[in-house]
Amino acid sequence: MKILQTQTLRGPNYWSICRSKLIIVRLDLEELADRPSNTIPGFYEGLVEALPILDEHFCSPGCRGGFLTRVREGTMMGHILEHVALELQTLAGMYVSFGRTRETADPGVYQVVFEYHHEEAGHYAARAALRLCQSIIDTGSYPLAELRQDLRDLRNLRTEASLGATTDALLREAERLGIPWMQLETCDLIQFGYGKYQKRVQAALTSHTNVLGVELAGNKDNTKKILAQMGVPVPLGETIYAFSELKEAIVRLGGYPIVIKPLDGNHGRGITIDIQDWEYAQVAYNRAREVSTGVIVEHFYQGRDHRILVVNHQVVAVAERVPAHVVGNGLETIAALVDRENRDPRRGVGHDNLLTLIQLDEATAEMLVSQGFTLDTILEPGQICYLRATANLSTGGIAIDRTDEIHPDNLWMAERISRIVGLDVAGIDVMTTDITKPLRAADGVILEVNAAPGLRMHLAPSQGVGRNVAAPILQMLFPPGTLKQIPIVAVTGTNGKTTTTRLIAHIFSQTYAAVGFTTTDGIYIGDRLLKKGDTTGPQSAQIILQDPTVDIAVLETARGGILRSGLAFDRCDVGVVLNVAADHLGLGDIDTIDKMAKVKAVIAEAVHTDGYAVLNADDQRVAAMAENVIGRVAYFSMDMRNQLVRSHVHRGGIAAVYNQGYLEIWHPDWIHRIERAEQVPLTLGGRAPFMIANALAGCLAAFVQGVKVEEIRSALRTFTASAQHTPGRMNLFKLGNYHALVDYAHNPSGYAALGSFVKNWPGPKIGVIGGPGDRRDEDSIELGSIAATIFDEIIVKEDEDLRGRPSGNAAYWIVQGIDRQAIAANFTVPYSICLDETVAIEWALDVAPSNALVVILPENVSRAIELIMSRNPIDNDTEPVFSSTSLPTDLPIVEHNILNGHVKLRQPANLAASVRYAPQ
């Protein structure tokens, strides 16, 4: 076996709408292609020995142990690898359960799909699962040491990828509230919501956090001074910057006991408390200087350490923090007790676990000495040995919830302090003998105020009630009744995506200040181009969703992005599916139109419960998508007699219909007549049926999103199929006494749709055609066949990007289609071959007769338009003047064969001298 390819999905996808985080492994079984598991000696026994927990896996027949039953009775190795990869992650603390395995069109090659929590861990699990299965096949077992190493590696990857307990809590709460989020990896931020309604956090720092408050809290000396000025009890102390100042500072404080800590430290680093002599003070000073140049020397106050969490100037949780310690049992040494404590599953490395591992170091040794213990001391039953002076969770401390015990005066004081310092989220550290009494009555003081406080001590304290402190933070960012995200309109289909996306964006520009949209020619906000190129994937969509100026997103969503990464969003407000036809078949293991329909259906199924899926009722595969839509459905149709539309409207639905020359919106109680098609420039005077269908879809998407009919009508009248609005989409140019039309049609359905317009042209029709090199031979043949029914003369060219084909090969198959159609229909279609696209276009434009229509289907739209513009067109035109003329016969004539990818041309004697010829 070997892994051919691994890819990562991060959004709703072909395999699942709800489970967006999936790994896809393309697995070649090689010699195991025809060997199910029951034919491999000892495999079942070896697998059960290595992972007996697999007995918990359900599979057909849908009960516990179902998977192992399949293994015993015989299943393919791809299916087994799926389950092993899931179980390895689960054993490493990342519970996952979703998986799928499907054989591809390539014999013995499978797509193995399984869920992941962290990408690197998911990729590792795939490789480890392969090693495990291969080892059992080869030797009958998988060494326990290797399995343990795999699990250690997976746990390490989990730890490295974890965002921390605070961030994880915020993300879980956001998901509970239905707030979308994304990680802005370049700056370690989390974004909640989309567009102009977004909020950002970095742990407990938020979009509302005052930078001045953060600066003040970061300087403990200044914080203490301002709190003292405002009447808040704070420790006596001062800040020094040289060792020579230490002794005098201690004298001014009245002697020992004292606390020495860094001026701008955090997480308890560099703090030493209850210092009783000069020797220990020197050690403590050096420890603080390792963290900060400034050192705070304070009087030490007896009591218990508490953290008060204040969010939006309201106390939401209180916890008592107890330093790391062990309790004796009369049997074990302190070292053994520490080992036992560290085996608590809640403890781990860093801030990602509920508790942190207790480390034995120099600070521990000092604490032990101060208590008269060593690591070998055996404590009496119930006797406590403290291992740290400070009570931070990051050094192994524990938390006890005291939220319900805090005295009202202390609560009021904490909320006042948050306003004095100016923090929206503040962690206030209090030392007091009794939190149930007012601070002054219990000789308590405010030790410090922290910006971005950790939440984990409140989320899951060692004792007491856990508090959902993430909820008030998100309620502060998104108060009840406020919007959390901008509307999202997603558009997909085989043909018409870019035109429809641009039209919808144009309609929304009537009501929204900043419309962000992505297309095959670039990313736009309003009329401003942000990035040029094919931007129909999730990364481009995220640029719009992350932009804080955008009011609404209109996202062209192509097949490739869905298959490679999934969607950029979890749910959309409107999902438009225009059509499904044969294109890109054979790529990405999508080899049938039905499978392609499933890809496109992702957009419809991603519509949220209050949104609309806008579906083409004239396309059977698209109409069938309604069955899996959780939101509402609206149909569009070119046929006012469409029974699906009529029954849908009868049941209370909405539809857009082309009726008696008008674009209309139908509802059970009324009909909105939007505009006559011939008055809509996009439809080229009503002569382009597929453009009428695109206009219907665009109108309906805008209507269900709340745009008024008058605004839709106004937008339709001002949107043209021009090189500016829709480059490469039915751009018609008048060049003196003939016309040129540029369109991006590149598949059979696109050719057929274009033909519905071109066939009605009264003059000669010349086609400059080609096809992408990564399509199937039969697709290219069909392009040629369709072209032969549309044009009076054909020039076959090729793309610069041959996509793996030899030069001339794609043109060869198109010519085969032209010849086949000519034979079948018993007529002759003159054609020529010029592989260079630029030369072919210039050729056609140079020899175009009067009243001709030169239809150019280019790979490079902008270059084609530049060639036309260089000839000074009169204007983009939708109402050409027709006159009859005959087609010239002086185009290059091709000998009807292509040998070894080379085109043979012979030059007619009367060809204009200015024409350039394709290479011989």
Image: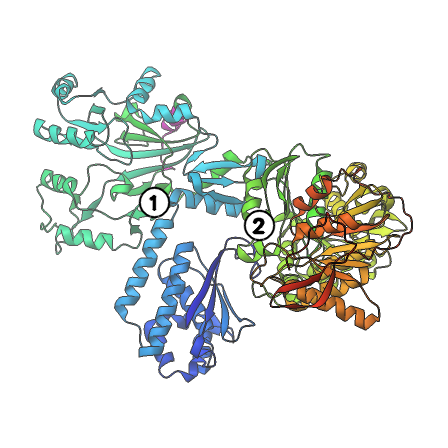
Q: Marks 2/1: CA distance? A: 43 Å
x, y (%) of residue 780?
68, 64
Q: Is residue 138 above or below residue 123?
A: below
From the top left corner, tell me how far across and down residue 551 is, in percent. 63, 36
Assign a secondary structure to mark 2. loop
Q: Amino acid at mark 2?
A: Gly
Asked whether, in this view, residue 100 is left or right of residue 213, the answer is right
Q: What residue is disc 1 on? A: 461
| Magenta-drawn segment | 403-418
In the rendered view, would you say 158 is above or below 479? Answer: below
Judge whether 79 appears above or below 801 on screen: below
> Can residue 650 be seen in the rendering of this structure?
no
Circle 1: is it few (<14), some (14-19), or many (20+) Cα within 10 Å? many
The foreground one among 703 and 268 is: 703
Q: Nearer the viewer, residue 738 or 786?
A: 738
Quadrant into which the C terminus falls: bottom right
Looking at the rendered structure, the number of numbered marks drawn on it comes to 2
Kind of residue indicated by mark 1: Pro
Rendered image coloring scheme = rainbow
Res. 400 image quadrant: top left
Closer to us: 324 or 35: 35
Tag 2 residue: 537
